[in-house]
Amino acid sequence: MISQLNRRISGVWDDFINLFYPNICQSCGNVLFKNEHAICSRCLYQIPKTNFHLQKNNPVSILFWGRVKIEYASSYFTFAKGSKFQKLIHKLKYHHRTDIGIELGKQLAHQLKGSKFFDDVDLIVPVPLHPKKQKIRGYNQAEVIANGMNEIMKLEVNGTNLYRSVHTQSQTRKSKLERWENVDNIFNLHETTLFEYKHILLIDDVVTTGSTLEACAHAILEAKGSKVSIATLAYA
């Protein structure tokens, strides 16, 4: 009885707060309904989904052919500069909107659960930031996405074993060759035994040339019997 009363009071208080500080969709700016979080249902429906999770040889997996052995790879949606969905990634990375990462991580997880290719994944591993950059940003956006995926897939997230040993410059304005040179041999494992004979699902926000993910995969595959698949929110 008391718990029901507390829920009612909490609901009334939330409604009162929303009159003055409404929760809005971080994509379109419309007010969210109670069951919506960070992104409205209409925008989630309109996100330009790739459906790569249903194709083994898709544009993301092809990126890694001849570079590193990847089991499967997928991205949730197509990243187009200037679109309202680009704003979601920008807000996640630079404006502390971790709720966007959680919500989109859930959506990515729902998509992967509808694919036979990711059935035997053992661990979710986010692409790590260097501690210096993570301290400045306050969080690792890839780990936030991974935590959202964990809520749906119920798989352990290991955000510590794979680490970035060198603090590098941003990849944003670099060429394909410069991106590869910027991340070559900068990722390592603390304990290779933790990933032995495990199928690792490597997570990042956006894949462009795949250089960072390639470097991470090479480090993970140092663990005996390990396998790597890749999933990102967006494909540029």
Image: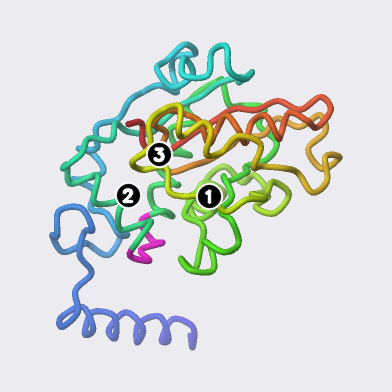
Tag 1 residue: 168
Label at residue 89: 2
> Which of pointers 1 and 3 lies earlier in the amino acid sequence?
1
Tag 3 residue: 206
Label at residue 117: none
The residue under the point 35% across, 63% down is 97
Report the amino acid beneath label 1: Thr
- In this picture, residue 69 sits left or right of residue 168: right
Q: Quadrant of residue 173?
A: top left
The span shown in magenta is 95-100
Q: Is residue 174 visible?
A: yes
The residue under the point 55% across, 21% down is 72
Tell me the element at label 3: strand
Q: Quadrant of residue 213?
A: top right
Q: Position of residue 113 (x, y in %)?
A: 51, 32
| Colouring rule applied to residues | rainbow
Report the amino acid beneath label 2: Ile
- In this picture, residue 181 sits left or right of residue 193: left
**Mark 1 vs mark 3: in front:** 1
